[in-house]
Amino acid sequence: MVLEKLSETLRNTLSKVANALFVDEKLVNALVKEIQRALLQADVNVKLVFELSNKIKERALKQEPPAGLTKKEYLINIVYEELANFLGGEGHKIDVNKKPFKIMLCGLFGSGKTTTTAKLAKFFQKRGNKVAVIQTDTWRPAAYEQLKQLGSQINVDVFGIKNEKDPMKIYKTFEPELQKYNIVIIDTAGRDALSEDLIEELKQMYVLVNPDETMLVMSADIGQAAERQARAFHDTCHVTGVIITKLDGTAKGGGALIACAVTGAPVKFIGVGEKIDAFEEFKPKNFVGRLLGMGDLEALLEKAREAVTEEEAQDMGKKFLSGKFNLIDLYQQMETMSKMGSMGKLMEMIPGMNQLQLPKDMISVQEGKLKKWKFILDSCNKNELEDPENINNPRMSRIAKGSGTEVQEVSELLKQYRQAKKMTKMFGGSGSPKAMEKMMKRMGGKIPGLGNLQMK
Ligand code: GDP
Ligand code: MG
């Protein structure tokens, strides 16, 4: 796992939040302190750490959680969101929009350019591109052989001229042939430092190649120095993206990742091992998700993302009012309500319904019940779902067995369904707020099947 230590600390911190009794200022302060410590240990710039932690703190103390999320869940979500934003938010995809699409790599000695050339080639080849790589590093002995050998492992054409000293000449020699490929990746020479002659060489290559992307390759172990380096290379050859390599090998890789995120050149890929496959697109959200232990987090984030859309609510409202209503709809309805936390919000979203002035939080669906219902529905066949009246006693036992529930629970679900159905029939087409209000009054303020819908 990349940045194992950071990941472990963050996970521990978040599980403390999850286990806390309630969210208060003390908890938020403790959380923020631990996040600060974890990031500083991962070599993230002090100023940035404080900026980030202040933002988390401010949001955690000031913002109210959206419907459907508890304070604790929301707090964890804030940490996730802010960390992901910190690293570049959505991430930056490479748009291969011409042929050949030329990607030039640059970087210092040993940063991982040649290895990354092969990794990138494989990455694009896997996505259906015809890829060529060309070695223009005339400084490192055997650079051409190294790339040739890597290329043969992945079946990618490698161009280069052994013992040639002029990188420009190498490129010009093969330029016509390179036109046949979708993607051409150009490996270049490095130096120990960004010296005058490296700058000169890269500038000339940049003009000659006219690359569509210029990728700076940097090793994670340089930590915060990445920011300075990224800026320097950027001034030389318009870096459009950064590739951080060797993130597998250092506990301090956070420094490089975050330093780059603040330069104009975002991190687009990361190298996480020596093997050609040890390479991935850098997607800050996924990356942070993994750092925080996505397993447990996934459900929660899903929930946050799913804050019910207006459209969804309207669709459901229409179905409800039309009387066309089966078991699947019932389940979806309950699920949507549980997502929103209350039926009040649903009502607000259906045009006209807000005039009803229903009390908030009329309905709260128990999560446990919902889960059981899901199991039950999973055990029904299509015919039963669409027309629940087909579910007779033997079928009920079968469904109970299949879903690990009691016959009584299946029966209860059916009862709820029948009551809800009865109600939708009463609405039957006359779905005006007035009609609904009247009907609810007639029913003594209760809509059967949907819990206690108390009128004001
Ligand atoms: P160049 O001088 O910039 O071309 O660097 P190379 O591609 O020759 O790589 C230098 C060393 O770093 C080699 O030993 C590579 O195997 C190693 N290397 C490159 N990328 C990674 C990575 O993501 N993880 C690890 N662990 N090693 C890497
Ligand atoms: Mg090299």
Image (tube, grey):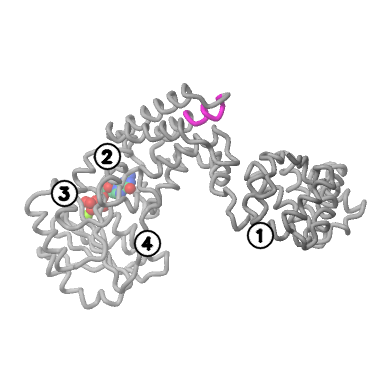
- Which one is in front in this view, the residue at disc 1 or the one at disc 2? 1
Q: Residues within 10 Å of mark 4 (few under 14, many from 20)?
A: many
Give the CA separation, mark 3 to mark 2: 18 Å
The residue positioned 88% from the left and 58% from the top of the image is: 389
Residue 94: percent from the left, percent from the top?
35, 61
| Position of residue 343 in the picture relative to residue 392 (left or right) | left
Circle 2 sits on which residue? Answer: 221
Q: CA distance from mark 3 to mark 4?
A: 29 Å
Residue reaching furthest right? 393
Is residue 15 within the magenta segment? yes
Q: Position of residue 98 (x, y in %)?
A: 31, 72
Q: Please state which amino acid type lies under the numbered disc 4.
A: Lys
- Measuring from the top left, give residue 37's x and y in whole percent: 36, 27
Residues packed near mark 3 inside 10 Å, few (<14), some (14 to 19) or many (20 plus): some
From what the image shows, is residue 116 above or below residue 4?
A: below
Residue 122 numbered tag = 4
Residue at 40%, 47% in the rendered image: 284
> Tag on residue 232?
3
Query: Is ligand 1 less than 8 Å from the beta carbon at label 2?
Result: no
Which callout, 3 or 4, points to the residue nearer the camera? 3
Residue that mark 1 sits on: 315
